[in-house]
Image: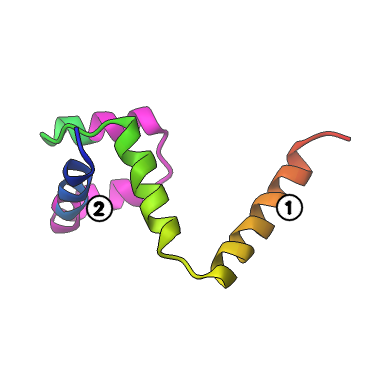
Amino acid sequence: MSLQQLDAFLAHARERPDLAQRLREPLELPELLALALAEGFAVAEDDVIAAQVREEQRLDATELQRRAGQEARRLRTFIPG
């Protein structure tokens, strides 16, 4: 269970159009983990979180601010009051 397994799974998915299409659809985390396992990759929840953190660290300040604004708007409509 490592980030390398997740990277390998995503590379594998790029080579398989059916799998790539499945990953383009919204998936719950347990569905993603089960899909990876079915393809022979041991991916854990921590790996997915680490990949998200890794991607966010690559973003510049402008993009981070844009995403923070989107999240704030989403939460504002979600939280009553």
Seen from this angle, which residue lies furthest right? Answer: 81
Q: Residue under label 2, please give it.
A: 20
Indicate the position of residue 12 as horizontal and vertical percent values: 13, 51
Magenta residue check for 10: no
Quarter location, residue 69: bottom right
Magenta residue check for 14: yes
Which class describes the residues within 10 Å of circle 2: few (<14), some (14-19), or many (20+)? Answer: some
Mark 2 or mark 1: name the one nearer the start of the chain: 2
Q: How many marks?
A: 2
Indicate the position of residue 2 as horizontal and vertical percent values: 20, 38
Which class describes the residues within 10 Å of circle 1: few (<14), some (14-19), or many (20+)? Answer: few
Left or right, 30 with respect to 37, comes to right
User: What span is colored magenta in the figure?
Assistant: 12-35
Position of residue 9 relative to residue 40, above or below, is: below
**Residue type at tag 2:** Ala
Quarter location, residue 41: top left
Q: Nearer the viewer, residue 71 or 50?
A: 50
Disc on res. 73: 1
Left or right, 81 with respect to 75, comes to right
Most frequent secondary structure within the magenta stretch: helix
Disc on res. 63: none
Mark 2 or mark 1: which is in front?
1
For the point 46% across and 66% down, the residue is: 59
